[in-house]
Amino acid sequence: MRKEIQVGLLGFGTVGSGVAKIMIDHQQDLQHKLGVEVNIKKVLVRNLTKKRETDLPIEVFTDNLDEILNDSSIDLIIEVMGGMNGTKEAIEASLRAGKGVVTANKDVMAVYGPELLRLADANKCDLFYEASVGGGIPLIRTMEDGLASDRISSLTGIVNGTTNFILTKMKQENMSYEEALAQATELGFAEADPSADVDGIDAARKMVILASLAFSTEVQLDDVFVRGMKEIQDGDVELAESFGYTVKMAGHAEKDEEGIAVSVEPVFIPNSHPLASVHNEYNAVYIYGAAVGETMLYGPGAGSLPTATSVTGDVVAACRNLLLGMNGKRSHSPQHERKVKDDDKRFSRYFHRILVKDEVGVLTQLTAIYSRQGASLATVIQHPGKSERDAEVIFITHRMSRQQHLDVLKELEEADAVIDVLSHYRVEGDEK
């Protein structure tokens, strides 16, 4: 009978050091839950001479991956190196060596997840990736286990803490985008190069992972429609508030008989919706199931200890499987064939903010464009422009296809009466 499980830890940065701290500080809890000790035997680092604040003895650190892979006493690998450089290869090598893997790597799982899960199945190993999405929120475990018997039809989520922090500051403290980004960087919520966050790429990778799991199909990064938060124009946040909405950088995924649709973009969310009250660096995902109805999971989306908590939760699950002889017994094959909806099958309401010439008959010209495209208007409002010669027109449509939305925008941009299409947003939530 086993008395301990030995673990190899790849990476000792923010998350890796957090994992080590939890496993050391909570060792008695882990033993109580599993009945055995769980010890970190080796830690892979790039620089052996770097000073580290940790209770781990110096001899556990190595800069040689093979030293970990070839150690037959190590049963489980925790990959928290981050990024794409060498991480896929390290996970592949671990699985081929017959070692289960726990990873927090959203980049690798978004691009190579199906391939790595098939490799795990082939080598009868576990591959857990809870911490790849949502930091400390148990999203993947909830969908994979808690909602396993349900059919998820759609999910909408705030899955990037940086953009949510920025938008919170823009709304609550009237900060400019630049001011809010500077504060996010100062507090460590944004990287020195925030482009992956503000351009929506980070959230798109997470939505690939969630949508693949929710719909049991192989969603690819190219399937995700992405618009970054730089599309948000001055005055949009205040305008949204005046209509009873909050601007959020949100991911959305849906599935029906026509196929799947996945997007990441700034959207208008009704102030009455639970996601509108998710502030600062927090994340939340709102899930629609056929049986359970509507549920929301909320919590810290990043940070050393929240993310490390998710990693350690996966470690406990992997260790249980090892102790029960059940590791690698779970098939990860997708149930449904990948089928992506065309734009004429994706329906929503839209907000259009248009700068026009302040002339007689302009409104009639604009409404004629919508009519030609079969689009119906729910709200029409005109505001004074910045000069006597122009005006701003606000339209909120009834439900229409994304193709109709694109065709309307094209006609608006070509219309003589239109100076500029200032901004446009998908409006989240059902019509009242």
Image (cartoon, grey):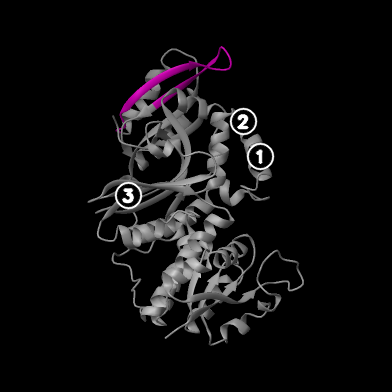
Give the x, y percent position of residue 395: 40, 26
Q: Work out how far the residue at label 1 is from the one at label 2, CA to CA, in angstroms.
A: 10 Å
Q: Are marks 3 and 1 in contact (CB under 8 Å)?
A: no
**Foreground: disc 3 or disc 1:** 1
Numbered tag placed on residue 183 in the rendering: 1
Left or right side of 297 for 292: left
**Which residue is drawn at the image coordinates 33% and 74% (left, top)?**
331
Residue 368 within the segment the image draws in magenta: no
Q: Are marks 1 and 2 in contact (CB under 8 Å)?
A: yes
- Amino acid type for the residue under numbered disc 1: Gln
Task: Name the residue carrying label 3.
Answer: 154
- Amino acid type for the residue under numbered disc 3: Ser
- Amino acid type for the residue under numbered disc 2: Met
Quarter where residue 130 is shown: bottom left
Q: Work out how far the residue at label 2 is from the one at label 3, CA to CA, in angstroms.
A: 33 Å
Question: Is residue 82 in view?
Answer: no
Dividing the image into 4 quarters, which one contains the N terminus? bottom left
**Among numbered discs 1 and 2, the one appearing first in the sequence:** 2
- Per the image, label 1 sits on a secondary structure element best described as helix
Q: Which residues are magenta?
A: 374-395
